[in-house]
Image: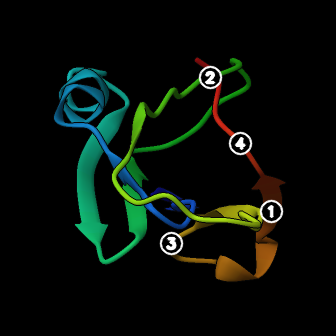
Amino acid sequence: MVIIEVSLLSGFIMTSKSRILLENRTIVKKIEVKANVVYIYLEKLNDESQTFILQLEQVIQVKNLKPATIKIYDYYQPGGLQISCYSGVGS
């Protein structure tokens, strides 16, 4: 099982539409939202490229917004952790 752990930008939440779109993908086993982190559980990954789009909604204005992290790791072998950052959202 693979986990994608998305820390949300300060002042943002994931939209319910985004959750529905993710849950309808066959590769997605489960989604959890805890505080400001979204956990996307995948059954497995293969060599095919996958794109996941999370629609975020700003609920609080935050000055000097800091980048947030995205972590991807195998649930059973978390040592192979991959980390990326993002700092903004598209319109």
Circle 3 crowding by C-alpha within 10 Å: few under 14, some 14–19, many from 20: some
Residue occupied by mark 3: 75
What residue appears at the point 80 percent right and 64 percent down from the top-left corner? Answer: 83
Is there CB contact under 8 Å for labels 3 and 1? Answer: no
Q: Amino acid at mark 4?
A: Gly
Q: Which residue is mark 4?
A: 88
Q: Secondary structure at mark 3?
A: loop
Whole-percent x, y for residue 65 in the image = 71, 63
Counting residues from the start of the chain, the first of labels 4 and 3 encountered is 3
Sequence-wise, which precedes: disc 3 or disc 1?
3
Pointer 1 residue: 82
**Colour scheme in use:** rainbow
- Report the quarter where the C terminus lies: top right
Q: Is residue 80 left or right of residue 16?
A: right
Above or below residue 55? Residue 12 is: below
Between discs 1 and 4, the one toward the N terminus: 1
Q: Is residue 45 left or right of residue 18?
A: right
Q: Quadrant of residue 55?
A: top left
Q: Disc 4 versus disc 2: distance between alpha carbons?
A: 20 Å
